[in-house]
Amino acid sequence: MVQAFIVLLLVAGFGTTTGSSAWASPCTAVEVVVARGTNEPGYLGSVVGDPLYDTLLQALPVSSSSYRVNYPADLLDPTSISRGTQDMTAHVMWQASMCPDQRFILVGYSQGAIVTHGVLGTGIVTALGGMHVLPFELESKVAAVLLFGDPVRLIGWNVPGHYAWRTANYCTGGDPVCGAGIDFGQHGNYGWAMWPAAEFAAARV
């Protein structure tokens, strides 16, 4: 089953990735940490991350910054997901030490959703090995988790229970990566979810 959702992600790949973000972000009230999809263009990701952050800037009642998880986002690289969990976890730990009052919105799209699951400790992902799970003492720093086109959803798994109430998981009808659809074009159709996701997160910061 794990192999099945990885194959789906390979088929759903995008173009070449660009850029990387600075290690430390300002001590804003909230930081939006985004793991983009497979080979997805854009800074935070053109399908989800970039438009979502633009929407969050309008919806959040507090100051915010963003961080682009530094990982290959390439499933031809067998270390990609593990490296994503390493960078996301290490960044949150660093920011928490530098900005003790800062909270986080963790965002994952497609392969990035698997990375986010790994950081949160979702069993089916940690079973792959090599995952870097966020220490439990930082669990309260996570204000919200936003997942889009999530392959883990396809196989019936969810985030660990203590994260469930602050997690929203969006799957476009027809998307075969997260649902039972057959239209791979729908895997890039998440514009409709930007405001619901932003409002969900804003209510939890």
Image (cartoon, rainbow, N blue to C red):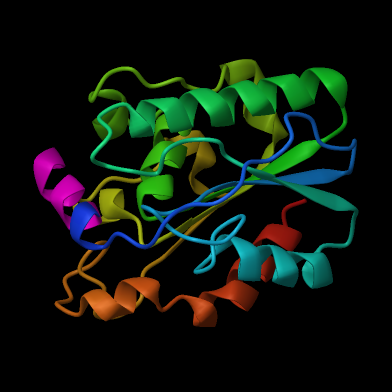
Quarter of the figure with residue 45: bottom right
Q: Where residue 158 sits in the image (x, y, percent)?
A: 35, 46
Q: Position of residue 111 (x, y in %)?
A: 36, 48
**As displayed, is residue 105 above or below residue 123?**
below
Relative horizontal placement of residue 178, taking residue 39 as reference (left or right): left
Q: Is residue 6 magenta?
A: yes
Give the extent of the magenta segment: 2-9
**155 and 20: which is toward the camera:** 20
Q: Main secondary structure of the magenta part?
A: helix
Q: Is residue 23 above or below residue 189?
A: above
Q: Does 79 appear above or below 116?
A: above
Quadrant in which residue 131 is drawn = top left
- Decide if residue 66 is on the left or right side of residue 112: right
Give the residue drawn at x 77%, y 38%.
103
Which quadrant holds the N terminus? top left
Q: Residue at x 59, y 74 (%)?
A: 194
* Residue at the image point whose x is 68% and y is 40% from the top: 21
